[in-house]
Amino acid sequence: MRSTNRLATALAVVATLVTGIYALPKVTRTGRYLYTEDGTRFYIKGVAYQEQGELSTDPNNPFLEPSSFVDPLADANACKRDVPFLQQLGVNTIRVYSVDSSLNHDSCMADLSSAGIYTIIDLSLPVNGSIDRLSPSWSTNLLDLYIRSIDVFSKYDNVLAYNVGNEVVIGPQGSDAATYIKAAARDVKAYLTSKSSSALVGYAAIDGDNTWLDPLANYLSCDIANANSGDNSIDLFGLNNYEWCGDASASAYASKNGAFAGYNVAAYFSEFGCITSPPRLWTETQALFSSPMSDIWSGGLAFSYFPATSSQGQFGMVTISSDGSTVTTSDDFDRLKTQYGLLSPPNSPSQSGAGAATYPSCPAQNSSFIASTTLPPTPNDAACACLQNNLACQFTPKTSNVSGIVGPLLDTGCSLLGGVGGNCNEIGGNGSTGVYGRVSFCDPSTKLSFVMSEFYEANNRNPQSCDFSGNATINKNAPSSIANANAAASSCLANPSATFTPSAPATASGGSQTGGSGSGSGNGNNNNNNNNGAMSMGGQQAMLGVIAAMVISVVGGALTVL
Ligand SMILES: *[C@@H]1O[C@H](CO)[C@@H](O)[C@H](O)[C@H]1NC(C)=O
Ligand SMILES: *[C@@H]1O[C@H](CO)[C@@H](O)[C@H](O)[C@H]1NC(C)=O
Ligand SMILES: *[C@@H]1O[C@H](CO)[C@@H](O)[C@H](O)[C@H]1NC(C)=O
Ligand SMILES: *[C@@H]1O[C@H](CO)[C@@H](O)[C@H](O)[C@H]1NC(C)=O
Ligand SMILES: *[C@@H]1O[C@H](CO)[C@@H](O)[C@H](O)[C@H]1NC(C)=O
């Protein structure tokens, strides 16, 4: 036996050397704690790792959120440059805020894995790639974006978790957006399960008053059906916490410890490292990684390896030379390295003593937290593509910067529709009443085509009412059997509130021109429209320029710094 084992071990070592595969042990959640495969408790000892993109100057965006990003896991040279410093720092996890699924990540992910470093990957992107906190929805374009990233990263052994959102809810007002976050967690979890992935599903929250933060955390980990099921629960709640400033004391965390003392899934600090009382001493790590905090939290991530500007000042532990070739560490880096090196968090409770997972009922709605337990449905690509193909008037942008015009055009379209007695309820949703329009899960372009079609039809298909300054085109392939946009929705969205396990999107992007087997000769109503077009156009022109209250274009999302 003994010699066989030795031989097997020797062969395994050889295989490892030959193939270069150094599989990191899987990290899974048992109850509220994380464990590696051998039953050792796992604490996230990490650092945020992403260079800051261009900062948004939108006055509606008070958080200095970026308007662009550079995927740090697609830059093989930068990873080779930085991994030795991440190792010096002693981290076992990095958090990356935005990735580009069209790029290759093999080199960085392999280098990180070899260094024993896991990744927490935020699936959202700046601008139009996150759940918009001002006008939230959980829609096909976001689901597809998230799935594409998961598909690219699921082959690596060192993805610890995927975050479905960062700082989407920032207070009682707008906490209805939690319904969309929870729906995203539900669908991403189902997708990961269908791929046999054990990666955790997370959310990272901005810190705030416990009266809304506590219900938000409990809501994201509760079971809407009161069946103690984890199907609609996150696994990992991240708190972006900057409460410990300078050489504070453990009492800095008393309130948050109290709020999370009985939490049912894993929680950690998805960012920490206050900059308002410099220098940063990083003494909070001693508190966070020892009892009693280690009973409540599974570690945290220091913000940030790279320089990052915020309204409170400058973050960062290294500077990179202008040619990108060298790293200069700061005293901040050295102090964190020293503090991380001193940690020996308790290996308790044991995995068998961690207790079975429980998923309590959801917090009641009140004025501090207004999210309904009726979640939005799973976005359905096929249904939205069918709808788009069957609509009489289609959004046909002439620019590639679609995200720059779709919001203003929706505002215009909804206000025009309001002027002819219609409304935009079908494309909207209400996370506090739990009522979602049938078209609410479609991507913004399909929503816009729906609104344009309703307006066009309300104007008796006057061709000029399917123009929108050159942004819309009459769909000659729309089937004549489908009377109008409402009928198209009924036909394509037969079960608009369904939840199901999503599948990977088709590789071709949306807005396809296929389908529509109807006659090529237009539709029966056209005759009327040709006669009385000019009059209704006068009314439309007058309404153009009306600023609707509905704003779709502003973003909630990625890499937010206090
Ligand atoms: C709402 O409920 C939460 C607990 O879920 C509580 O902390 C908060 O104080 C309540 N807010 C109000 C206004 O009652
Ligand atoms: C964001 O907008 C760009 C172009 O404006 C588009 O290519 C991309 O698919 C959009 N992303 C999402 C998630 O909607
Ligand atoms: C897209 O359009 C918006 C709104 O006009 C603008 O702010 C943004 O800079 C544009 N983006 C690109 C990449 O051109
Ligand atoms: C949702 O509905 C409630 C009750 O009708 C209303 O007060 C609230 O403004 C609505 N929210 C949104 C985002 O439309
Ligand atoms: C399309 O709509 C945008 C936003 O309202 C507008 O700026 C543009 O001029 C319109 N026409 C074309 C052809 O892009």
Image (spheres, rainbow, N blue to C red):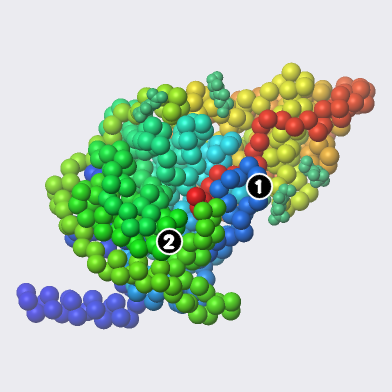
Which numbered mark, 2 or 1, is in the foreground of this view? Answer: 2
Q: Is residue 157 visible?
A: no
In this view, which residue lies farthest toward the top?
421
Query: In this view of the protein, which residue sits in the foreground, 492 or 40?
Result: 40
- Residue 462 quadrant: top right
Q: Which residue is mark 1?
A: 58
92 sits to left or right of 306: left
In this view, which residue lies farthest toward the left?
1
Residue located 24% across and 79% down the image? 13
Image coordinates of residue 189 in percent, x first then y, are 39, 44
Check the picture and name the quadrant holding the N terminus: bottom left
Q: Is residue 124 above or below residue 384?
A: below
Instruction: Look at label 1 and name its amino acid.
Output: Asp
Query: In this view of the protein, which residue sits in the foreground, 200 or 327?
Result: 327
**Cβ–Cβ under 8 Å for marks 2 and 1:** no
Residue located 72% across and 30% down the image? 548
Residue located 53% across and 42% down the image? 131
Q: Residues within 10 Å of mark 2 (few under 14, many from 20)?
A: few
Q: CA distance from mark 2 to mark 1?
A: 29 Å
Query: In this view of the protein, which residue sits in the foreground, 143 or 1?
Result: 143
Image coordinates of residue 320 in percent, x first then y, are 52, 74
Q: Is residue 428 above or below residue 553?
A: above
Image coordinates of residue 553 in percent, x first then y, are 65, 42
- Could you say which disc has been placed on residue 278 in the image? 2
**Dot 2: what SS?**
loop
- Could you say which disc has been placed on residue 36 in the image? none
**Dot 1: what SS?**
loop
Q: Is residue 484 visible?
A: yes
Residue located 27% across and 50% down the image? 250
